[in-house]
């Protein structure tokens, strides 16, 4: 058994056939983690004993193996509450915080027999595009250890790419699943806003956050989505679509499928080789009967500035609860009064990027500026949504590069936040509009993975998965890095 190359579906079939046991899979995962963690640092917390005990319990219970994910090792981004497990959100202020309940997505997978191998590293409170902003050190890209894995869900992407686990849960607020998926050469799925409950997610920006997954294949992403999607009375934004069979269109003919190419996504700043690879894949879809049409999303140029007004505004509100009184670390400095206590606790507990976004968000919400910045950004957000609505009356899906470049060097952009933010230029509009999107690897440029993004209208997960599975079929065998 070559554990690291297994897909979720292959592992599930092997468990059901009796080719191996869950405890054997778990031990192989632990062996891979032990061999690679000093190089990659994909995990903040490895739950070795919990994983082994869960695997043994599943092996004793034949009925448990009926689930497609039962007995299969997985990672969980450290912003998702996991009962009894230290959950830090990559932040010093939550260094020893042990979650007292499960996020709904985690609870659903636990009920289906997920083997939790540990909590994956991430940018602090999911704020970043490189996983360099973690208070516990960066994660390294398994394709090139001198480069970032992307962010903020870089730990999960690196863990799947390197074969430490077979899938991982991540979150996507402006590209935080899709961008690291592209950089690490795995599949990253961001569902429609409201399809997956956000209950138990340590919120960054509540109107933008989505919970999704990293896998090796599109089919595995569909399997995971079927297990985490659905309404939740604890999250009023969730919606019941009544159809959770996301595999129904996989490998179906794409003849007549209408593909839109947003002209604003193929402009100056896009790496030429990435553009060539993506356009080659589009031509291959055309050869299979798909139709391609250039379309326009005229407000695309405003997506990034709108995102970096609305997101910090929500951050400044969501992070206000971390004051060192209710939970989390408290300052060890002497204090003069309550205000001094708050300021010192939050200064000690938050990193530079968190403080930067809190300050920016507080500013745009302040008296005299809320109309000029925040409310104006909300109006432009509506225009961005309208752009997508108009385009999806003409085409079935949109295809674009996931990122303008391949993975950049560690330290290259850490002191230039604006340059760092630009790495999400093709992903943030999707979150502003609440749409589903998937990134999948389609080739290599200078030995580094290139990601292609497929965007669909709301609740069109089956359609984007269909296109993704066809591209996967054309591409051939999944490539893994030689760490």
Image: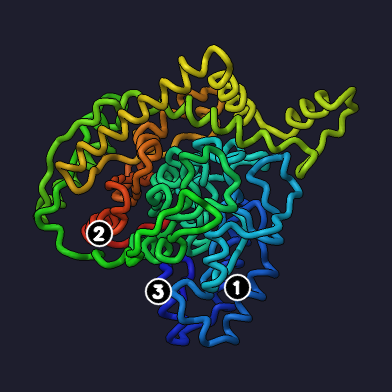
Q: CA distance from mark 1 to mark 2?
A: 34 Å
Q: Which residue in the protein does label 3 denote? A: 10
Residue 427 located left or right of residue 297: right
Which residue lies under the disc numbered 1?
Answer: 27
- Mark 2, residue position: 466
Residue at coordinates 34% horizontally, 44% vertically from top-left? Answer: 435
Of marks 1 and 2, which one's residue comes earlier in the chain? 1
Seen from the viewer's position, the closer of residues 172 and 265 is 172
Query: Looking at the image, which is closer to me, 292 or 198?
Result: 198
Residue 299 shows up from this direction: yes
Mark 1 vs mark 2, foreground winner is 2
Q: Earlier in the sequence, mark 2 or mark 3?
A: 3
Tell me residue 188's x, y (percent).
Answer: 40, 52
- Label 2: element kind: helix
Marks 3 and 1, how far apart at CA = 17 Å
Residue count near mark 2 (Cα–Cα under 10 Å), binned few <14, some 14–19, many ≥20:
many
Q: Quadrant of residue 126?
A: top right
What x and y, as percent, mark residue 330? 81, 37
Q: Are marks 1 and 2 in contact (CB under 8 Å)?
A: no
How many numbered discs sit on the rendered protein?
3
Residue 112 in picture, x, y percent from top left? 52, 72
Q: 365 left or right of 349?
A: left
Look at the numbered discs 3 and 1 and tell me whether their residues touch, using CB distance below 8 Å: no
Of marks 3 and 1, which one's residue comes earlier in the chain? 3
Name the front one of labels 2 and 3: 2
Q: Name the mark nearer the viewer: 3 or 1.
A: 3
Classify residue 57 as left or right of residue 65: right
Q: Position of residue 266 (x, y in %)?
A: 24, 31
Please determine whether, in this image, residue 147 is positioned above or below residue 192: above
Callout 3: few (<14), some (14-19), or many (20+) C-alpha neighbours within 10 Å?
few
| Residue closest to the eye, 20 or 335 | 335
Residue at coordinates 60% horizontally, 64% vertically from top-left? 117
């Amino acid at each position: 058994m070559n554990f690291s190359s297994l897909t979720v579906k292959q592992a599930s079939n092997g468990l059901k056939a009796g080719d191996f046991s869950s405890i054997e899979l778990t031990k192989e995962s632990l062996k891979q983690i032990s061999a690679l963690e000093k190089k990659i640092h994909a995990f903040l917390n490895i739950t070795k004993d919990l994983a082994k005990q869960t695997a043994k319990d599943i092996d004793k219970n034949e009925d448990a193996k009926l689930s497609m994910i039962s007995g299969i090792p997985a990672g969980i981004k450290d912003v998702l509450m996991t009962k009894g497990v230290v959950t830090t959100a990559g932040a010093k202020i939550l260094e020893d915080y042990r979650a007292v309940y499960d996020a709904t997505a985690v609870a659903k997978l636990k009920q289906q027999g997920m083997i939790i191998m540990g909590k994956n590293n991430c940018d602090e409170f999911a704020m970043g595009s490189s996983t360099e902003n973690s208070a516990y050190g960066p994660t390294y890209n398994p394709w090139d250890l001198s480069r970032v894995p992307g962010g903020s869900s870089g730990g999960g992407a690196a863990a799947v790419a390197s074969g430490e686990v077979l899938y991982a849960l991540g979150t996507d607020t402006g590209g935080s699943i899709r961008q690291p998926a592209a950089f690490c050469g795995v599949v990253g799925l961001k569902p429609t806003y409201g399809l997956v409950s956000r209950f138990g997610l340590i919120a960054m920006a509540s109107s933008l956050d989505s919970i999704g997954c990293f896998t090796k294949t599109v089919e595995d992403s569909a399997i995971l989505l079927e297990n985490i999607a659905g309404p939740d009375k604890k999250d009023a934004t969730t919606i019941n679509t009544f159809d959770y069979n996301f595999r129904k269109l996989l490998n179906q003919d794409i003849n007549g499928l209408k593909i839109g190419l947003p002209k604003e996504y193929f402009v100056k700043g896009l790496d030429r080789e990435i553009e060539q690879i993506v356009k080659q894949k589009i031509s291959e879809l055309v050869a299979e009967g798909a139709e391609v049409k250039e379309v326009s999303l005229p407000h695309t140029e405003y997506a990034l500035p709108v995102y970096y007004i609305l997101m910090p505004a929500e951050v400044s509100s969501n992070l206000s609860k971390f004051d060192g009184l209710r939970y989390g670390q408290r300052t060890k400095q002497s204090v003069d009064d309550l205000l001094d206590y708050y300021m010192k606790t939050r200064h000690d507990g938050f990193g530079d990027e968190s403080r930067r976004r809190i300050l920016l968000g507080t500013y745009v919400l302040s008296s005299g500026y809320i109309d000029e910045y925040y409310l104006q950004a909300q109006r432009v957000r509506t225009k961005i949504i309208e752009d997508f609505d108009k385009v999806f009356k003409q085409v079935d899906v949109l295809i674009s590069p996931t990122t303008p470049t391949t993975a950049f060097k560690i330290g290259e952009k850490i002191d230039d936040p604006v340059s760092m933010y630009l790495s999400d230029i093709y992903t943030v509009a999707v979150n502003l509009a609440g749409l589903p999107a998937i990134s999948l690897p389609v080739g290599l440029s200078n030995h580094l993975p290139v990601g292609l993004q497929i965007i669909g209208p709301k609740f069109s997960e089956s359609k984007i998965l269909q296109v993704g599975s066809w591209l996967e079929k054309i591409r051939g065998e999944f490539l893994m890095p030689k760490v």
